[in-house]
Amino acid sequence: MNSLKTLTLLGSTGSIGRQTLDVVRHAEGCLKIHALGAGKNVRLMEEQARLFRPAVAVMMDETAARELRERLKDLPIKVDQGMEGIINSVTAEEVDTVVTALSGRVGLEPTLEAIKAGKTIALANKETLVAGGDLVMSSAQAMNCKILPVDSEHSAIFQCLEENPETIERIILTASGGPFFGWSKERLESVTLENALRHPNWEMGAKITIDSSTMMNKGLEVIEAHHLFNVAYDGIEVLIHPQSVVHSMVEYYDGSVLAQLGRPDMRLPIQYALSYPTRWKNPFERLDLRGKTLTFHEPDFEAFPALALAYQAGRRGGTLPAAMNAANEVAVSAFLQRKVSYLGIIDIVGEVCAEHKVLDSMDLDSILDADSWARHRAEELILT
């Protein structure tokens, strides 16, 4: 194993955060937590802080930070709050690697600050690249910072890349199809919140589970892949693979296709991002292909228009992907609160994208302005 790496983990109480801590626990002293950051789950943050003893624990929510401070007063752990606390945790001198597993666009600013501070980024927050991909990747290049993908699909592509990536002909992103694979648009009209939260293969947070069911998650991953691997949108294909065994593929100019296979267990891509460039042994369950049948299908763009919308937004570029992402976050939140129907999610996102006046300037202020406008407009549409 490599020498000790010191981490700041943002989004520690979410699904990816919890699985990251499981990787840390099994890494035989090769990973150390400097800081944990989360939204407002005080109970779980206290439990994690007591187990991993970070120097710093940050809550985005001020009330939650106050409660956590009281709960941890018997330990020498600094409790910080808000975006300022998050940014301080990622730029700390002791930190080597920042795991960005916050949900949504909120991950953009701390990722940029971590890059400016020269940290390695283990990226589990696809919205960061969707909203600000050009800015993030140019900043990382300027600082010579590594961005290591944690999403299972992008980790698979990363592992399949050879030393001459210019010979790539196309990237093939696989998608499970979610709980509604094969459903018609008419049948999707009857989808309930409970139906949409039942993913057949992966254990994920509520927002990403809904995104997976609408195929918006795959659309966001298409945009993320474009930025991470510098591949044109025409060179990125999506195939539905219900078994979730082949996590993605890369086809080269000579017709060779390299694929990465594994169990649907997020701890594997998380560990690879943290162990890179080496591989660590672990006790996780191994893939057994005996008796398995692997199938691949074309996506249904008519029943699941979110995927086509994401391709369109990515190709147009500028601030449109940021607006699309923001509208989707608001619409999914409304669906989770039973304020809009399932098909209403993409209706709202599509309307916001159609109305958005795209700016091609990709500075942070332009991205945040587009994000703010799109959230406000989506909220208006929800109320009508």
Image (cartoon, rainbow, N blue to C red):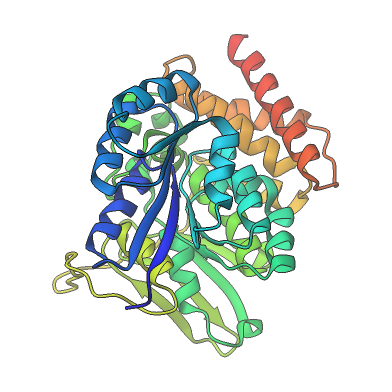
Q: In which quarter of the image is residue 337?
A: top left
* Residue 126 rendering spot, x and y as whole percentages: 54, 50
Would residue 216 appear left or right of 179 to someone viewing this image? right
Closer to the camera, 333 or 28?
A: 28
Q: Is residue 384 above or below residue 141?
A: above
Closer to the camera, 73 or 294?
A: 73
Q: Quadrant of the C terminus?
A: top right
Would residue 311 appear left or right of 202 to someone viewing this image? right
* Residue 140 rendering spot, x and y as whole percentages: 67, 63
- Residue 180 seen in the figure: yes
Closer to the camera, 349 or 13?
A: 13
Q: Quadrant of the N terminus?
A: bottom left
Identity of the residue furthest to the left in this view: 291
- The residue at 34%/54% (across/down) is 20
* Residue 267 rendering spot, x and y as whole percentages: 30, 59
Q: Is residue 66 above or below residue 47?
A: above
Would residue 238 appear left or right of 138 to someone viewing this image? left
- Residue 341 seen in the figure: no
Identity of the residue furthest to the top in this view: 384
- The residue at 37%/69% (across/down) is 4
* Callout count: 0
Q: In this view, does 69 lie above or below 169?
A: above
- The residue at 60%/80% (across/down) is 168
- The residue at 29%/75% (across/down) is 280
Closer to the camera, 85 or 147?
A: 85
Would residue 378 appear left or right of 159 to someone viewing this image? right
* Residue 187 rendering spot, x and y as whole percentages: 39, 31
